[in-house]
Amino acid sequence: MENMVYIILLIFHNIALVGCAAAPFYNLRLVNQRAQFGPKVFYQLDKVVEDTLQGLEPYCWSFIILLFLTGFGFPVTYYAFHGELKEFSSITFTAFLLKHLFVLGMVVIAFYITFFINPKIREVFSKFSPEAPPEEEISKLFFAFRTKRKRLCKICFIFAILILVISPVLRFT
């Protein structure tokens, strides 16, 4: 029964890990494709980009929460079946600590993007219209926020890759 619980946890944990890596990967892919048109606002194109990027926020949060829950599910399961926590080697403890620091970094980045950058982008974008080109200052502000979000998304992607690299250490040491 214990192995079955571990298998189920591992399935959902791996799905969360892949989701945490896929979200920033595809966001960066979309942003890089959009960049081919340069720093000029194309209302319909930019609306699709923003609707797509900001529409992915709930999925990003869901994957991060699932990653946390399933990650803590492993030691809880061991405790439930053995009445004690599993002893860690120093390598396993270091990997555990690093993984959680990277996940925490992703949470901080996602929080900042969700509650600070994206609302500012929405506010600036609301001043645009499909009929008239935007003022240059507003356009510059829009692309400055997008650039900041892109940099943070790159860091988030690196954290996700590092989590994917570190995770097997936790399972097999």
Image (spheres, rainbow, N blue to C red):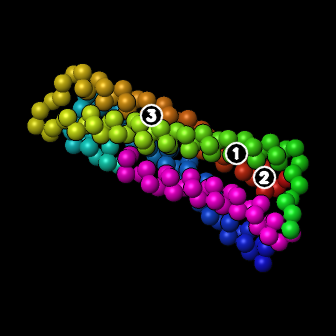
The residue furthest top is: 137
The relative height of residue 140 versus residue 153 in the rendered view (above or below) is: above
Residue where numbered disc 3 is placed = 150
Q: Pick whichever of labels 3 and 1 is earlier in the sequence.
A: 1
Measure how far apart labels 2 and 3 are at the Cα level. 30 Å
Q: Position of residue 68 (x, y in %)?
A: 63, 55
- Comparing 83 with 165, the one in front is 83
- Comparing 48 with 152, the one in front is 152
Let me know if residue 57 is in the magenta part: yes
Q: In the picture provided, is 1 more to the left or to the right than 124?
A: right
Name the residue rendered at 15%, 30% in the picture. 133
Q: Position of residue 87 (x, y in %)?
A: 89, 55
Task: Give neighbour class at mark 2: few <14, some 14-19, many 20+ (Cα, 10 Å).
Answer: some
Would you say the residues marked 1 and 2 are in contact, meaning their CB atoms lie under 8 Å apart? Answer: yes
Magenta region: 53-82
Q: In the picture provided, is 20 more to the left or to the right than 76?
A: left
Residue where numbered disc 1 is placed = 99
Quadrant of residue 30 within the rendered picture = top left
Quadrant of residue 5 within the rendered picture = bottom right
Measure how far apart labels 1 and 2 are at the Cα level. 9 Å
Element on which disc 2 rests? helix
Name the residue rendered at 26%, 43% in the picture. 47
Identify the amino acid type marked 1.
Lys
Residue where numbered disc 2 is placed = 170
Identify the amino acid type marked 3.
Lys
Element on which disc 1 rests? helix
Q: Pick whichever of labels 1 and 2 is earlier in the sequence.
A: 1
Q: Position of residue 67 (x, y in %)?
A: 62, 55
Question: Magenta span: helix, strand or loop, mainly?
Answer: helix
The residue furthest front is: 83
